[in-house]
């Protein structure tokens, strides 16, 4: 198998989410060193930091890298065809409909098909005309969680035997010990002027994130505390309603990674109330920082959180309010969740993701 070439489709485009781009960057950085028996051809529109040795880099022109156009479907396919790879890994859903070689295809989730009204009208046709045929012709489809396997079958017609579940990892930057957590907690509270304990939600505000349940559960609390919500957009409740509660509602807007880590470090709990997730990386990031995590009882979030999280029925405001009340008043339970979360998150590393991905390549190249 020595010398077999795997092409990594490492394009980074504006259509890709922050999480999708992180996946590409982490794997491109780690795969060559963790799989020295393979050769890698990295195709990207950006210069990526990669180790020397078993790597070749092939620049993709901006017009060719762009998703959903003729450049991707014809000129990018031709560039792949001339690259001499034995296997191609399309690392996002954006790919040529007619792959020139055998391929692996990563699909993180199918939220665009589950909730099509949340997205552009262009998305469903792209999934029908491109994603579905690329998935059905793939040697293997990679996904982040077991709960997504049924969706791949039901929405795209991919047989479960051709799916491999490879969980994502957590960046080492999120791992804090108790001293680091305490230092960051004090710093962020001082900088933002927080006087009360605060509950944190980190993520976008799309309707499936179910923020109305979180806001109403916070409003029902009798223990003084604030609610901090990152990013921008409506919360799904009346403006007048989400200004009333046991403390202040803070909308941070866009926040950088270091700011996010500090918020995780300082919060009483991080809540993920989403009705649907492909993986729930924010839950693991919170636990790595030492934040007790609370998740909605949806398949992927329970799969990722395991026994290290508190959970609630997704739209049960009273249940979530009770859970938050306990975390605001029971220090012993908070410390138990912190310990369990740190243990849990050790199972999810980007090195493990890269090694499992390389194992799939080797399986197909035998």
Image: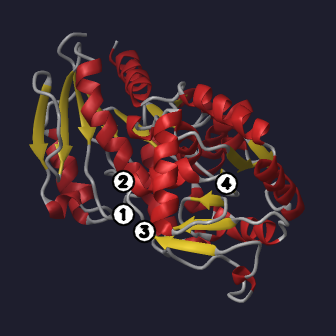
Residue 132 visible in the shown view:
no
Q: Is residue 41 at least partly visible in the picture?
A: yes
1 or 4: tag closer to the N-terminus: 1
Cβ atoms under marks 2 and 4 closer than 8 Å: no
- Total tally of numbered discs in the picture: 4
Q: Secondary structure at mark 3?
A: loop
Q: Residue at x 36, y 63 (%)?
A: 15
Asked whether the beta carbons under mark 1 and mark 3 sit within 8 Å of each other, the answer is: no
Q: CA distance from mark 1 to mark 4?
A: 27 Å
* Residue that numbered label 3 is attached to: 254
In this figure, which residue is indicated by the disc labeled 1?
Answer: 15
Q: Indicate the position of residue 78 as horizontal and vertical percent values.
A: 16, 48
Q: Is residue 1 above or below residue 17?
A: above
| Circle 1 SS class | loop
| Marks 2 and 4, the one that precedes in the sequence | 2
| Disc 4 target residue | 271
Q: CA distance from mark 2 to mark 3?
A: 26 Å
């Amino acid at each position: 198998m020595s010398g077999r070439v795997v092409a990594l489709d490492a394009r980074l485009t504006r259509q890709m989410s922050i999480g999708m781009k992180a996946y590409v960057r982490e794997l491109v950085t780690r795969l060559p060193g963790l799989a020295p028996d393979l050769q890698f051809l990295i195709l990207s529109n950006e210069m990526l930091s990669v180790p020397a040795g078993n790597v070749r880099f092939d620049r993709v022109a901006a017009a060719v890298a762009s998703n959903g156009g003729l450049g991707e479907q014809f000129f990018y396919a031709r560039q792949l065809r001339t690259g001499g790879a034995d296997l191609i890994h399309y690392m996002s859903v954006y790919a040529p409909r007619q792959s020139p070689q055998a391929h692996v295809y990563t699909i993180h989730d199918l939220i665009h098909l589950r909730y099509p009204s949340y997205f552009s009208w262009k998305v469903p046709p792209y999934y029908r005309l491109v994603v579905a045929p690329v998935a059905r012709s793939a040697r293997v489809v990679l996904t982040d969680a077991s709960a997504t396997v049924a969706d791949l079958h039901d929405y795209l017609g991919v047989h479960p035997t051709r799916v491999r579940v490879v969980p994502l990892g957590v960046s080492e930057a999120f791992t804090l010990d108790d001293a680091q957590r305490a230092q960051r907690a004090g710093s962020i509270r001082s900088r933002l002027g927080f006087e009360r304990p605060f509950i944190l939600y980190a993520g976008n505000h799309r309707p499936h994130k179910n923020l109305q349940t979180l806001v109403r559960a916070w409003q029902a609390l009798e223990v003084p505390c604030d609610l901090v919500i990152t990013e921008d957009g409506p919360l799904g409740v009346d403006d007048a309603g989400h200004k009333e509660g046991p403390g202040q509602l803070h909308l941070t807007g866009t926040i950088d990674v270091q700011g996010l880590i500090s918020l995780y470090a300082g919060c009483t709990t991080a809540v993920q109330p989403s009705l649907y997730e492909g993986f729930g990386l924010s839950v693991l990031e919170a636990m790595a920082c030492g934040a007790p995590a609370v998740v909605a009882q949806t398949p992927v979030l329970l799969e990722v959180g395991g026994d290290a999280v508190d959970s609630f029925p997704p739209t049960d405001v009273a249940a979530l309010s009770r859970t938050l009340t306990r975390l605001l008043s029971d220090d012993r339970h908070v410390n138990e969740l912190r310990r369990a979360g740190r243990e849990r998150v050790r199972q999810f590393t980007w090195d493990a993701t890269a090694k499992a991905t390389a194992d799939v390549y080797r399986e197909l190249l035998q």
